[in-house]
Amino acid sequence: MTSKKRCVIVAEKLAEKELRLSPVGEWRLTQARPDPTIVAADLDGLAAGTTITFDAARLTAWDSTFLAFLVKLRQMSRERGLVLDGGALPDGVQRLLALAETVPERKGAQRQAVRSSFLAQVGEEAEDLGRSALDMLSFIGAATMAAVALVRGHQRLRLAEFGRLVQECGVGALPIVSLISLLVGLILAYVGAVQLALFGAEIYVANLVGIAMVRVMGAVMAGIIMAGRTGAAFAAQIGTMQVNEEIDALRTLGISPMQFLVLPRMLALTLMMPLLCLYADLMGIVGGLLVGVLVLDLNLLEYYRQTVVSVHLTHLWVGLFQAALFGVLVAVAGCLRGLQCERSASAVGRAATSAVVTGIVSIVVATALVTIICNVLGI
């Protein structure tokens, strides 16, 4: 006897070349069910040409679990030269088995996971990194050619769209840039004050915050913010157009996506990044000023004079150059990942994520290179 919570298969040999299988119980996904390989032991002792029949009198319920069992049983029977007779099975089971026989499984549908070695994975990642770098260089070259065509008058810039992009990249980013830069200035001032207080030189907090913000941190923080905010937005916008086949429609009409979509975004972000950098520098210095005046009890005028004396135009120009460079890199990363987007909703999300990662990595690498070059040149 079989309870409702368990299903079994009973094998009974009726004659020399006849085996009857009796499925018992509820054959459902939620129930414990026998492994088809258990029946293989009964099939191994049968002679070729033996007929396998069924008795479904005690089969109370079934679903795809029972069908999968029968398909496996049919395969094992054919391998042993046995004949499977399903005439006693329920009508629904017979129809589905016939359908499975008519439409066989496509070859290669079941993919086997191949586990690569560690060195192979490192090599594949290195190839992807090199390919990505080459794609970005090629994309920058194409964007440069589009900019040259614009300067020569071979291409017109839509001023209304360009103005909207400038507002989105500039004014729209002021709140988040204000908050992050102010907090970065506070953090730099607190960290520097801990060490400078040991020597009674708290006034040099102004030097630390001023030079750090104007030369490096203002541009870096503004670039990272724009990579997460605007770079992802560019990738999502262009990626959505790619999904909706709008990019293909532009090419069909003879309109270059590089000149129509990429160039305005790159110019807008490149123009706005130095201005955002200046604003970030100001907010960072204000954050250090708050710590110096309210926490370290420094004189406001004295802190201001120390900042003016320590920060030179060289530091400002280096920061502005880095900001403009970061604007190009963030715009290229966002537009490139958007154009490389596949035609699915999940691909748009992956494109936005990849744009943020590519933009931030590019900013860090560019900062390191600019710092090394300035150190070698003595700037």
Image: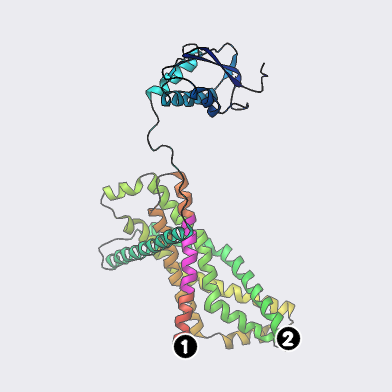
| Type of amino acid under label 1 | Gly
Q: Residue at x 38, y 44 (%)?
A: 244
Q: Which residues are magenta?
A: 353-367
Near-viewer residue (310 or 57): 57
Q: Which mark is residue 198?
A: 2
Residue 187 in view of the camera: yes
Q: Is residue 145 magenta?
A: no
- The reply to whether the C-beta atoms of the residues labelled 1 and 2 are less than 8 Å apart is no
Which element carries disc 1, helix, strand or loop? loop
Work out whether 75 lies above or below 2. Answer: below
Q: Position of residue 242 (x, y in %)?
A: 38, 48
Residue at 48%, 66% in the rendered image: 361
In the image, is 143 to the left or to the right of 92? left
Residue 299 in view, yes or no: no
The vertical placement of 114 against 313, above or below, is: above
- Asked whether 20 or 309 is in front, the reply is 20
Q: Three-letter amino acid code at disc 2? A: Leu
The image quadrant of residue 267 is bottom left
- Total number of numbered labels? 2
Q: Dot 1 surroundings within 10 Å: few (below 14), some, or many (20 or more)?
A: few
**Which structural element holds mark 2?**
helix
User: Most prominent secondary structure in the magenta stretch?
Assistant: helix
Q: Is residue 358 magenta?
A: yes
Task: Indicate the position of residue 247 as horizontal and vertical percent values.
Answer: 34, 49
**Residue at the spot of label 1:** 378
Instruction: In the rendered view, tell whether residue 106 sits above or below residue 135.
Output: above
Q: Quick one: 19 or 97, which is closer to the camera?
A: 19
Residue at point 59% right, 70% down? 181
Whichever of labels 1 and 2 marks the residue nearer the N terminus, that label is 2
Label at residue 267: none
Quadrant where the image shows the N terminus:
top right
Mark 1 vs mark 2, CA separation in Å: 30 Å
